[in-house]
Structures are given as structure tokens and as C-alpha cells.
């Protein structure tokens, strides 16, 4: 659970804190049950900001905690 669910939740939390997902989180099924590739496509790679993508990838790898 810690290797998949927590990092994904941290990515969602980061995107929400930056106002990139709106005020409501995406449905749990679409963000946690999808494949790694689909999650990356939906929530990470779709952004044009290279620094943001790098930040999100670091969060997924567990290299950095998400903002509180």
C-alpha cells in the first residue's frame, strides 16, 4: 500500500494544492485502481511545466514528501 497508494495520494494532494485539479479530488477508482502508465498519463505527464512533472515524479518515487 505504501508503495502505490500513498505516493498517488500525495500526487493528487500536490495537484489540488496548486489548484490544478479543482477543489474536489478525482474518484478513488480512477486514481488508485488504474495502471501505473494510465496514472502517469492522467495526472503527471499531461502537464507542460517540466519542473512540476519532475516534482510529481519525485513524489511518486518517494523522494520527497508532498506539501501539507
Image: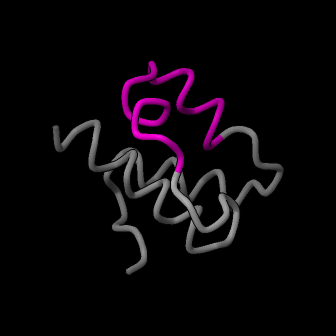
> For the view shown, which residue lies furthest in the bottom direction?
68
Could you tell me residue 61's position as x and y percent? 37, 45
- Please name whichever residue, 29 or 67, is drawn nearer the observer in this view of the structure: 29
Could you tell me residue 67's position as x and y percent? 42, 77
Q: Which residue is drawn at 34% across and 49% down?
A: 7
Q: Which residue is drawn at 16% across and 37% down?
A: 1
Image-based side of 62 in relation to 58, left or right: left
Check the image and report above or below for 23 versus 58: below
Check the image and report above or below for 42 versus 34: below
Image-based side of 21 in relation to 31, left or right: right
Q: Give the range drawn in magenta.
A: 26-44
- Please name whichever residue, 63 or 18, is drawn nearer the observer in this view of the structure: 18
> For the view shown, which residue lies furthest in the left direction?
1
Residue 36 found in image quarter: top left
Could you tell me residue 49's position as x and y percent? 79, 57
Check the image and report above or below for 18 versus 11: below
Q: Residue at x 37, y 25 (%)?
A: 33
Amino acid at each position: 500500500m505504501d508503495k502505490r497508494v500513498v505516493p498517488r495520494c500525495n500526487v493528487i494532494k500536490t495537484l489540488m494544492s496548486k489548484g490544478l485539479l479543482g477543489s474536489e479530488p478525482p474518484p478513488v477508482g480512477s486514481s488508485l485502481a488504474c495502471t501505473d502508465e494510465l496514472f502517469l498519463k492522467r495526472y503527471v505527464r499531461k502537464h507542460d511545466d517540466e519542473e512540476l512533472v519532475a516534482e510529481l515524479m519525485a513524489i511518486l518515487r518517494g523522494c520527497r514528501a508532498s506539501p501539507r
